[in-house]
Image: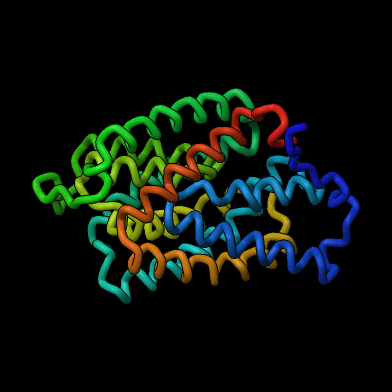
Amino acid sequence: MLLTISLDFLKNADIYSPGIIALLILAGFLVGIINTIAGSGTVITYSLFMMLGLPVNLANGTIRLGVIMQTLASTLNFKKHKALDWKKGFKLALPVVIGSIIGAQIATEINEAVFEKILAGILLIMLFFIFYKPERWLKTQVQKIQSKPTIIQLLLFFIIGLYGGFIHIGVGIFMLSVLVLNAGYDLVKANAIKVMIVFLYSPFALAIFIMNDQVHYGIGLIAAIGNVFGGIVGSKMAISWGSNFVRWVLMVVIIVFSAYLLNIPGLFNK
């Protein structure tokens, strides 16, 4: 019999009990590491929040609290180690912010089930390209790096902003793809820009969810404690262990996240 991941008993749990607090902090810590190194780690807290009884839209808004804290910590650590091209990050953040505001507003009103299946297909296609030409993910392509973002990059990041505001899960993978394959950065430098952009756009998306009463502050802030430490650890691992390590983590995350989105029988109860 296949292993089934099911924690239905959590729906009746006291979220302020020591056990649940510890679980939330641990989940936030793991999310912080995975999000900083690759992306899609938020699926852990997203699922946990729903297991604790939060409706999908409330869970979607609540995860933003931890994302802000985590990306602030990891951005500062990347900057400290001089791995962050912050000027390019600011320029690319503008279309993401605009897109995220629109996407977050849509998220408060729409069901994303069909969208998840499309996302899973896109991620699996992306996985093929990571295997097909790994050198493009491991080495800086100096000829592609420009101080000013291209029109294509601005358009792509606006679309990524729409998605990030809508659901956030997986947004880091899309950012890494554009930063590596189009902008020419290696995975470590792309990661640094990615977390900075996420930090800049997330407060705007969070504001939309707050305005629509779709944030649970207790659960979100407890998990955010783990997010902060996970972000610090993740950024140090990315810098110290290099692009090849980040690439392998990224591939594993894509496979697991795609399985989650496709709701493969016997693996997940969504």
Q: Is residue 9 above or below residue 228?
A: above
Screen quadrant of the C terminus: top right
Question: Furthest-right residue in view?
Answer: 12
Screen quadrant of the N terminus: top right
Residue 218 placement, left or right of 248:
right
Looking at the picture, how far across and down is residue 95, in whole percent? 34, 44
Residue 143 placement, left or right of 121:
left
Regarding residue 90, the answer to whether it shows in the image is: no
Question: Furthest-front residue in view?
Answer: 1
Residue 94 placement, left or right of 251:
left
Q: How is the image coloured?
A: rainbow
Regarding residue 65, the answer to whether it shows in the image is: yes
Looking at the picture, how far across and down is residue 38, in whole percent? 43, 51
Q: Nearer the viewer, residue 11 or 99?
A: 11
Residue shown at the point (20%, 51%) measured from the top left: 139
Residue shown at the point (74%, 68%) measured from the top left: 22
Q: Nearer the viewer, residue 268 or 197?
A: 268
Residue shown at the point (65%, 52%) measured from the top left: 45
Looking at the picture, how far across and down is residue 254, in whole percent? 48, 39
Question: Furthest-left residue in view?
Answer: 143
Q: Is residue 265 above or below residue 56?
A: above
Looking at the picture, how far across and down is residue 168, in whole percent? 53, 45
Residue shown at the point (34%, 60%) measured from the top left: 192
Quarter of image, res 195: bottom left
